[in-house]
Amino acid sequence: MKRPYEKPFLMKLQSRMMNKHGFAPGAGRRVRKAIDGVKISDLVDRYGSPLFVYSERTLRRKYRQMHSAFTTRYPNVVFGWSYKTNYLKAICAIMHQEGAYAEIVSKMEYEKAKGLGIAGDRIIFNGPHKPLETLAAAVVDGVTINIDHLDEINDLEHVADRLGRTINVGIRLNMDVGIHPQWSRFGFNLESGQAIEAVRRISRGGKLKLTGLHCHIGTFITDETAYARQVEKLVAFAYQVQAAFGYEIESLDIGGGFASRSKLKGTYLSPDVSVPTIEDYAEQICDALRNSLRPGHFPTLVVEAGRAMVDEAGYLITTVQATKRLADGTRAYVADAGINLLFTSFWYKFHVEVDRDVSGANEHSVIYGPMCMNIDAIDDGLSLPPLERGHRLIFSPVGAYNNTQWLQFIEYRPNVVLVSETGEVELIRRHEDLSDIERREVLPLRLIPELDQAAFQRELEREA
Ligand SMILES: Cc1ncc(COP(=O)(O)O)c(C=O)c1O
């Protein structure tokens, strides 16, 4: 077969920084033509670009893998779906269908969980800001509340007075488990004695009953042994408060934080090597429980993993809009999605795939988004074949925190679709238009442009 003509080219050789594991990874010749059997071209033809695509198959597989890793090692486990990681309704509904409770941290997330019909006794309310009225509603609803600070103890006592009954509560702890920076701004510190003081305060108040302990040590934790240290400290504290105050701790909530197969910037090794498996985490946690709990005592283990469940289920399809050479000769591409849609690109280097085979030599390239801002680089250096306008780039894994932290900045947010287990494509969030952006805005009458005043007057008269 005759090979197509390829234009000769001159390329400046850039050796760049190499580390002991070789060059920074790039797309190289990674080609993705479909997601779960649905062609990228069909997805874009139907739903446009950029486009978020979720794989229901991956999402359910991840949940089931996590469920099995823990339930085969410990008899009493509950999963709390971390809404902040991804609160698209369809994603939450799938997690709830699989059996997860809702783990929420705000009024908005509480309303979302209620909107999905989740019963109060399957909601876990964490976080440093629980508005009093939301807190009161949650108590009435039977929600599990993990207290973050002393003011919240006061708030809950106030609610207990109003209701004329005792309220069961959990408290959040923070502790040294060898992870730095330590997430010490949430909850009560264990080592300094703050935590035991908080329990003393609860006991003295006589209006709340401590039944649970909660602790979330951080996110993207690649040292699974940190969880063993966390569990040992939680169990020791549970027995300490039982001895000192008579409280029976019924649940130990270890938070989330398990790493996904994303690549944290600044790490050398590929996630395939550096990220523990779900079984590794489960083994550490359940072994530590077995070794530190008293025989026959099986408090509920609550796991609030978010990222490790959903990240790999999410893809973002983008389209190259322009190709450029920067002043220093670097190849650059402008894509139709930037940090507005991939907010987590500040910390993670995504896997980038091209939607077709492209011939020509690979080149060190940068990918910019459409924001008219210098910070809008979604990849500041990877190896790509020569791309042209219209070629598609597929970023993954992007299922964690991007559809909650995305910005409505300059551009409209695009469609989000779900590929079902049987290969149907369903729209789960419609793209925005100007009405979404302006719906909450109010333009004072005096600022309505002159031209519109007459029309406005007519409108008023018509309404009258
Ligand atoms: C209290 C709590 N639980 C669970 C999570 C989920 O963490 P991840 O997505 O890292 O698993 C978070 C995230 O910050 C959290 O604050």
Image (tube, rainbow, N blue to C red):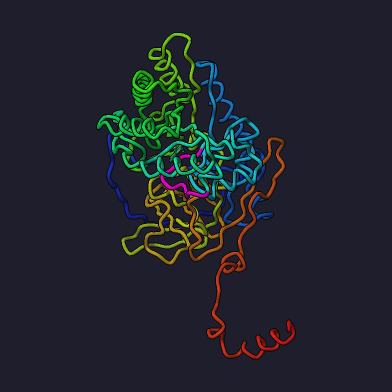
**Front-most of 302 and 141?**
141
Residue toward you, 14 or 460 = 460
Most frequent secondary structure within the magenta stretch: loop
Left or right of residue 391, residue 18 in this image? left
* Residue closest to the eye, 274 or 248: 248
- Residue at horizontal 56 percent and vertical 45 percent from the top: 137
In the picture, residue 46 is in which quadrant?
A: bottom right
| Left or right, 421 with reference to 298 | right
Does residue 54 lie above or below 209 as drawn? below
Q: Quadrant of ligand 1?
A: top left
Q: Residue 378, position in %: x, y? A: 43, 53
Residue 437 drawn at (x, y percent): 56, 66
**Looking at the rendering, in which quadrant would you find the N terminus?**
top right
Instruction: Depth check: give the residue in front, 250 or 356.
Output: 250
Quadrant of the drawing holding the C terminus: bottom right
Given the current orientation, which residue lies at the most extreme top position? 295
Q: How many marks?
A: 0
Residue 391 is covered by the magenta coloring: no
Residue 51 can be seen in this image: yes
Q: Can you tell which quarter of the image residue 439 is in?
A: bottom right
Write the residue at 32% across / 37% down: 22
- Vertical side of 361 occupied by 447: above or below: below
Note whether residue 225 is visible.
no
Locate residue 426, reporting x and y percent: 69, 47
| 330 relative to 341 in the view: left or right | left
The residue positioned 40% from the left and 32% from the top of the image is: 215
Residue located farthest toward the left when viewing the structure as drawn = 192
Task: Write the start and end of the magenta stretch as one range.
Answer: 125-133
